[in-house]
Amino acid sequence: MYSTTKFVQICGVDDAGRGSMLGPLVIAGISLDKSKIKDLSLLGVKDSKQLSPRIRENLYKKIIELADDYCIARISPRIIDASVKNHNLNHLEAKYMAKVISKLNPDVSYVDSCDVDYKRFGKEIAQLANNNKIHSYHHADSRFLVVSAASIIAKVSRDRSIHRLQKTHELGSGYPSDVSTVHFVKSYYNTHKILPTFVRKSWKPTQQILANSC
């Protein structure tokens, strides 16, 4: 599954919150010695979508302890909106994944591709990070344990950001499929005639709410 070349540090990178109407898009990466990959399996690491919030929180701490290094980048709604306006959301993710990889400086990296052309996505990250040892795949979070671990770090970090917002706002999960989230955005805009800074204004569901209100 992994490259047979004897690299020392292996990195996994994944995102969380890409489809949300609000809150940050989180990019997380972890780096560890390849000998520790089996330890991720022993911990019960899987794609974060296959795990409950409680198990993810528990694994988050264990992964951080096991990893040699990790990096978490949070992309604000303002930056996301500017990128979507220019049809560059995939480029934005590639840019931040490259930043994470550059910081961790591993020997080889595995990333979960958000681009339909996963090879193109990998090449873009490699160019931005000036690192040719990058392997991009669809569903990498379920194929490579190191990416599964990164997906857990990203998901827990994203959930914590939403939880902080939930302390002062009843906004649900943040996703457009959540009735509570859509109701919150509608109600907030109808009351204040402006959207909070943590809402992604470029998202179609948000734009529909603004159009209907007008």
Image (spheres, rainbow, N blue to C red):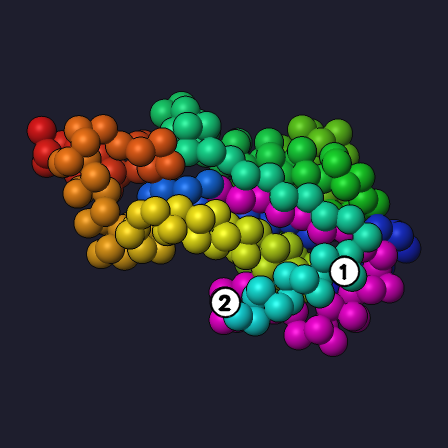
Q: Is residue 52 depicted above or below 122 in this figure?
A: below
Residues 51 and 141: in front is: 51
Q: Residues within 10 Å of mark 2 (few under 14, many from 20)?
A: some
Please name the amino acid that badge 2 sits on.
Pro
Residue at 13% in and 32% down: 211
Residue 211 seen in render: yes
Residue 96 quadrant: top right
Q: Residue at x 44, y 48 (%)?
A: 164
Q: Secondary structure at mark 1?
A: helix
Q: Dot 2: what SS?
A: helix
Q: Which mark is residue 65?
A: 1
The residue where tag 2 is placed is: 53
The residue depicted at 85 percent of the width and 57 percent of the height is 33
Identify the amino acid type marked 1. Answer: Glu
Membership of 47 in magenta stretch: yes
Q: Position of residue 92 (x, y in %)?
A: 52, 32
Of mark 1 and mark 2, the one earlier in the sequence is: 2
Expressed as whole percent of the image width and height from the top left, the position of residue 197 reads 36, 31
> Residue 128 in the image: x percent, y percent?
67, 28
Q: Magenta residues?
A: 25-53
* Quadrant that contains the N terminus: bottom right
Please tell me whether residue 107 is drawn above or below residue 194 in the rendered image.
Answer: below
Give the residue at x 71% y 31%.
129
Which of these two is toward me, 110 or 167? 167
